[in-house]
Amino acid sequence: MTSIDVQQLTKEYGTRRAVDDLTFHVGPGRVTGFLGPNGAGKSTTMRLVLGLDRPTSGTATVGGRPYASYDEPLRQVGALLDAQAAHGSRTARNHLLALAVGNRLPRRRVDEVLEEAGLTAVADKRIKTFSLGMRQRLGIAAALLGDPAVVLLDEPSNGLDPEGIIWIRELMRGLAREGRTVLVSSHLMNETATFADHLVVLGRGRLLADTPMRDFITAHSSPRVRLRTTDPARLRAALARRGHELAAADDGRWTVDGTTAGDIGALAAREGVPLLELADEEASLEQAYLALTAEDAEFAAAPQPLPHTQEA
């Protein structure tokens, strides 16, 4: 099975424990978002999975085997950790050709991934002339070169323009639909919410959550209703009798915490209170993430209250 399995993984650098007894599973057919504050251990974990560092204890395997045991690893695992790692004096084509030769991949794959990454027109230009976004596309092309069953991407949207962000989003979704295992580390919560099916969240090297994204948001937010009415006084009195408070929102609407639109609608109907608008709200992924990781951030500013966003 083409999965990533981390079992009781620990990595220490001197007296600092970067990864602390970490266990999780990344399965095929979905995009797994890999989240956590700076210093949470995400990059260290990905390096351990790819055999770029050795664990202090525990294991990290891909398809049931250590990454280092594969003779032609690009055929099994594609990864982007650092888009700046490519040699600046090489052309994009020659960079990919070197990788292809080292993994006994057909030369045609170079042209295929250059086209897929939108780099055909600059294939023979030196990498040192590339923008950050172009280097990012080249790194993604290299990750796809071996048509791998497992793909790991660290901040893949970094430096991309809006068109590029849409492209990488659809690419990750497409890889998952093909049954591949996709693990994506990102600091962009709003972007992660557009492509991730599942979340693995770290804090100070420990596992904080391993759950479907929708369940994660639900678990770390409370219900709230947003509404408009022509008779707020009567609705406020009816809500008060049931232990709820009608609060004014900044946009002229009203909110009620700890209940649902269905309950408020039924109550308004019984009381004869007209409602012009009624909708459930939920926290965004960003708000749920901040609620979970607030105590695990290595660097954090003073917390500020965050408004709920309306459910689409």
Image (cartoon, grey):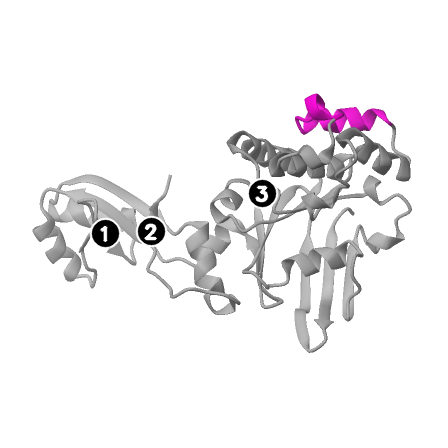
Q: Position of residue 198 (x, y in %)?
A: 58, 49
Name the disc covering residue 147, or none: none
Residue ID at (56%, 59%): 36
> What is the x, y in percent for residue 129?
68, 33
Residue marked by disc 3: 158
Q: Do the residues labelled 2 and 1 touch (CB within 8 Å)?
A: yes
Span colored in magenta: 107-124
Name the residue type under label 3: Asn
**Badge 1: few (under 14), some or many (20 or more) residues near its Cα, within 10 Å?**
some
Dot 3 falls on a residue whose secondary structure is: loop
Of residue 10 and residue 211, the one placed in the foreground of this image is 10
Please give the name of the residue rendered at 77% of the width and 53% of the height, measured from the top-left corner: 50
Percent across and percent down for residue 110 are: 80, 28
Vertical position of residue 73 compared to residue 11: above or below: above
Is 20 left or right of 283, judged from the image as shown?
right
Check if residue 152 falls in the magenta segment: no
- For the residues bearing labels 1 and 3, Cβ distance under 8 angstroms: no
On the rendered structure, is 293 left or right of 306? right
When the figure is inspected, residue 124 is found, relative to residue 137, above or below; the finding is: above
In primary-sequence order, the first of circles 3 and 2 is: 3
**Which residue is under mark 2?**
308
